[in-house]
């Protein structure tokens, strides 16, 4: 779930009308939308960007491979079972490790 909220002057006084996520010292990022249509990103964290990309690859690519291997490769029963097991194990391990590192 992704959500954003207006933080105003309460949490980040350097950006008066920012819309942000994770503004409680947990890798703040945000953006400001100006009246003329300009959008400016503020306060990115390299670790949380890396975390987001790795989780996307984990669930987007490996999850897709796991689903495809179990659904469409049933004719090669031994190969599809190993592919399904390996991708599932990689998804589990990366989710646990990245989740613990994020805390």
Image (tube, rainbow, N blue to C red):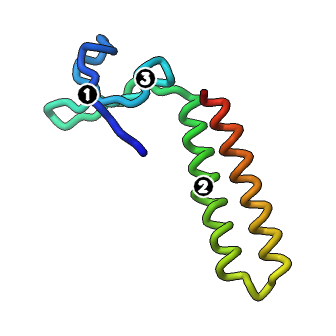
Q: Is residue 35 above or below residue 77?
A: above
Q: Secondary structure at mark 1?
A: strand
Q: Is residue 48 above or below residue 10?
A: below
Query: Which residue is rendered at x = 70% and y = 74% of the image?
Result: 69
Of the image marks 1 and 2, the number of the one nearer the N terminus? 1
Where residue 81 sits in the image (x, y, percent)?
Answer: 80, 73
**Classed neighbour count for the residue bearing mark 3: other residues with Cα under 10 Å, few (<14), some (14–19), many (≥20):** few
Q: Which residue is mark 1?
A: 6
Q: Secondary structure at mark 3?
A: loop
Residue furthest to the bottom = 75
Q: Quadrant of residue 54?
A: top right
Query: Which residue is rendered at x = 83% and y = 76% of the image?
Result: 79
Q: Quadrant of residue 52?
A: top right
Residue furthest to the right = 78
Residue furthest to the left = 35
Q: Which residue is mark 2?
A: 59
**Classed neighbour count for the residue bearing mark 1: other residues with Cα under 10 Å, few (<14), some (14–19), many (≥20):** some
Where residue 98 sits in the image (x, y, percent)?
Answer: 66, 37
- Spatial distance from mark 1 to mark 2, Cα to Cα? 29 Å
Of the image marks 3 and 2, the number of the one nearer the N terminus? 3
Of the image marks 1 and 3, the number of the one nearer the N terminus? 1
Q: Secondary structure at mark 2?
A: helix
For residue 13, side relative to residue 102 (left or right): left
Q: How many marks?
A: 3
- Spatial distance from mark 3 to mark 2, Cα to Cα? 26 Å
Q: Along the line of sight, which residue is nearer the eye, 37 or 63?
A: 63
- Look at discs 1 and 3 and give the one toward the viewer: 1
For residue 15, side relative to residue 47 (left or right): left
Q: Which mark is residue 43?
A: 3
Q: Along the line of sight, which residue is nearer the eye, 5 or 37?
A: 5
């Amino acid at each position: 779930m992704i959500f954003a909220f207006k933080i105003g002057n309460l949490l980040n006084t350097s950006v008066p009308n920012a819309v942000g996520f994770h503004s409680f010292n947990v890798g703040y990022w945000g953006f400001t939308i100006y009246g003329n249509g300009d959008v400016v990103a503020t306060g990115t964290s390299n670790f949380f960007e890396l975390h987001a990309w790795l989780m996307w690859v984990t669930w987007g690519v490996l999850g897709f491979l796991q689903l495809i291997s179990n659904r469409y490769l049933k004719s090669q029963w031994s190969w599809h079972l190993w592919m399904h097991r390996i991708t599932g194990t990689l998804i589990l391990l990366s989710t646990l490790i990245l989740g613990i590192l994020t805390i």
